[in-house]
Amino acid sequence: MNEFLHMGGYARFVWPSYALTLAIVVLNIIWARRSLARARADARRRLLRADAHP
Amino acid sequence: MAWTWFHRLASPPHVYALATRLTPWFAWPAAALIVAGLYAGLVLAPPDYQQGDGFRIIYVHAPSAWMSLMVYVTMASAAAVGLIWRMKVAHAVAASCAPIGASFTVAALVTGSLWGRPMWGTYWEWDPRLTSELILLFLYLGYMALRSAIDEVQRADRASALLAVVGVVNVPIIHYSVLWWNSLHQAPSVMKLAKPEMPAAMLLPLLMMLAGFTLYFGALLLVRLRGEILRRERSASWIREALTE
């Protein structure tokens, strides 16, 4: 296990590369869902406004 | 008759429903491929005879770099379709691509830099490959800045589409930079199927990661696309139904 984490002496280059890439993978999922949720909320507000002032 | 699929792809309600249905078909295979690719790349692949375990950065660097280019080509193609046929859905696709592409361009640049330090002895060099990839990042950022500077969606679509289409000249420059100029960056090792330069145990995890990232991009694009379609449909009655789901 220790040997695996050591990455043959390249640990301080390999692990930050993986951490950053996976962080960007996860963040993109969060950002995409948030972007859709915001668009849905805006659309819902527009519909309510249209109903109130036809 | 042959053009019905094209007309349907121009119909926002149709595409919105299709995107909702298709997302899991991209997301789950993507997750499986990425998890398997990570395990194969980190554990099963043998260390490189020159670069030792440092070469394993390739399994996150190459997929990120691939994303940065593939997403740009998707964005520019969609932008061109949007400009030529005035297709709202195409503009929505283009707008969905930019943040995804920009973030993976950052990943490609930083992981490349972390790979360059032990192998080339430097984090950064004004090398053709590195410089053209940095220009790609600025193209994405410029595209997003231009969009956010224009309030009206239709005008933002047209202006940013023009920028995306013009910027596509940078893509072949990035791809061929390592062949046209003397570059620190190594020449492509995957896109030469006739004479592969990697043994299967190293190549397979890479292909899994590339396929996984591509499907993952599909899933992200479909989720963002739904939001972008909603933003472009002001008072369509189908939205009421779409929102009650």
Image (tube, coloured by chain):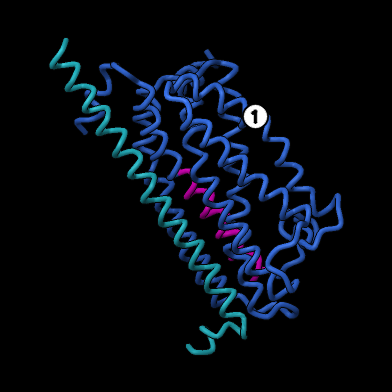
Chain colours: A cyan, B blue
Q: Nearer the viewer, residue B46 or B111?
A: B111
**In terms of image quadrants, where is residue B228?**
top left
Regarding mark 1 in the picture, which secondary structure is present there? Answer: helix
Q: Is residue B217 magenta?
A: yes
Provide the residue designation for mark 1: B165
In the image, is B40 to the left or to the right of B51?
A: left
In the image, is B245 to the left or to the right of B208?
A: left
Which three-letter amino acid code belongs to the residue tagged 1?
Answer: Val
Residue at the image point whose x is 55% and y is 68% from the top: A17
Residue at the image point whose x is 56% and y is 35% from the top: B143
Give the magenta-colored segment's residue range. B200-218
**In terms of image quadrants, where is residue A42?**
top left
Density class for disc 1 (Cα within 10 Å; few <14, some 14-19, many ≥20) is some
**Residue at the top extreme of this rendering:** A54
List x then y, in percent, for residue B45. Answer: 61, 75
Q: Nearer the viewer, residue B8 or B100?
A: B100
